[in-house]
Image (cartoon, helix red, strand yellow):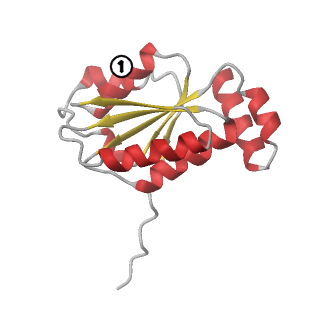
Amino acid sequence: MKNFDDLMSAISFAEAGEFDLAREIMKGRNSILLAISDICFDAGVLKYALNLGRRIQANIDILYLTRIGVHAGRLEEFMKTAIREEISCRLFKKEGCMKKAILEFTAKRREIIFVVVGSTPELDIECATGEKSLSEAWKRLRCPLVVVSKPQAPFTA
């Protein structure tokens, strides 16, 4: 809970323009995991992760769920932009279930302060339905999960 409290405090200070104080709070914890896939690729999620990385001076690890790398060029451009912003980026390509990939990635890396993903359906990509053990493991994710989704257009009749 302390890590979560520190993270929320740092984000609040960063949003208020108190970047130095936010950085001080976040010392020692310095990576964001951006989980993205070919199926639900959203450039808005890239922008969100870049802005957040800039605000709290965190590195960005990109977990790219892909089989053929449809958006590899766009991710390469994103990484170049991040480097210009002095944000270190690493790309990790995986296949299979997004939830499982996120859990395995965060279990091995303590420097991940939170996970950014584009949408809730993206979390279920290629995951077998009814995987009860995976659902239980998901509850033990060691860091906050930020779901960035576009607001839906209002319903009009």
Residue 148 shows in this picture = no
Q: Is the residue marked by circle 1 packed among few (<14), some (14-19), or many (20+) residues within 10 Å?
A: few
Left or right of 76, for residue 22: right
- Measured as percent of width and height from the top left, residue 94 is found at 27, 29
Q: Where 75 falls versus 56 (above or below)?
A: below
Relative height, residue 43 to residue 143 (above, below)? below
Count every numbered label the image shows and give the total: 1
Tell me the quarter of the picture where residue 102 sits: top left
Along the viewing direction, whichever of 127 and 24 lies nearer the viewer: 24
The vertical placement of 37 against 91, above or below, is below
- The image quadrant that residue 64 belongs to is top left
The residue under the point 58% across, 44% down is 84
In percent of width and height, residue 110 lies at: 53, 16
Q: Quadrant of the C terminus?
A: bottom left
**What residue sits 61% from the left and 32% below the top?**
58
Residue 152 percent across, percent down from the top left: 42, 67
* Residue occupying the far bottom of the picture: 157
Q: Which residue is mark 1?
A: 104
Q: Position of residue 103 (x, y in %)?
A: 38, 23
Which element carries disc 1, helix, strand or loop?
A: helix
Q: Quadrant of the N terminus?
A: top right
For the point 74% across and 35% down, the residue is: 9
What residue lies at 79% left-to-right and 50% top-to-bottom? 16
- Disc 1 residue type (three-letter): Glu
Residue 49 located left or right of residue 153:
right
Left or right: 51, with 70 as reference point? right
Say if residue 18 shows up in the picture. Answer: yes
